Image (cartoon, rainbow, N blue to C red):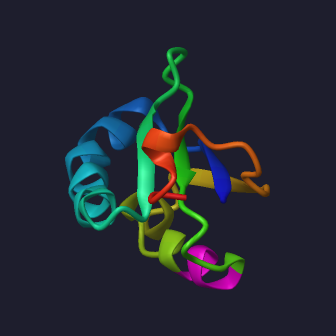
Amino acid sequence: MFVVTLTYTGPTDQIDARRPEHRAWLDPHVAAGLMLVTGPLVSRTGGVLIVSGKIGRAELEDLLKQDPFSVHGLADYALIEFEANKVNPALAGLV
């Protein structure tokens, strides 16, 4: 699994202008169960994606390059890969 943190690098007005496009990009990945949880940081300086282990690192890196925030140079991404060895039974099929 992965925790992906986004750090906004562009001006707030450009981030706000691209946010609907970014969220639309997220929608099919959330619907497919690839991205389990997504959302902005409370500080509004970036965001977090919790990503299923059903994708490899290289494939995830390629996918993130398609995010409108990435395409328009508005965010940097940090990937943290981890093994989910204790999982709530309600989430077992998702990880």
Relative to 72, residue 41 above or below: above
Relative to 73, residue 18 above or below: above
Q: Is 13 positioned to the left or the right of 46 in the image?
A: left
Residue that sits furthest to the top in the current view: 43
Count of numbered circles on the image: 0
Q: Is 79 positioned to the left or the right of 5 in the image?
A: right
Relative to 91, residue 66 above or below: below
The spot of residue 16 in percent (x, y) is 30, 36
Position of the N terminus by quadrant:
bottom right
Quarter assignment of residue 27 = bottom left
Q: Which residue is drawn at 29% across and 67% down?
A: 32
Say which of 74 and 84 sits in front: 84
Position of the C terminus by quadrant:
bottom right
The spot of residue 24 in percent (x, y) is 20, 57
Q: Is 32 positioned to the left or the right of 34 in the image?
A: left
Q: Is residue 78 magenta?
A: no
Q: Which residue is drawn at 72% across and 52% down?
A: 84
Q: Residue at x 49, y 22 (%)?
A: 44
The spot of residue 37 in percent (x, y) is 43, 42
- Dominant secondary structure, magenta: helix
Q: Residue at x 66, y 48 (%)?
A: 3
Q: Is 80 positioned to the left or the right of 45 in the image?
A: right
User: What residue range appears in magenta?
Assistant: 58-62
Say which of 34 and 75 sits in front: 34
Relative to 26, residue 3 above or below: above
Say which of 94 and 41 sits in front: 94
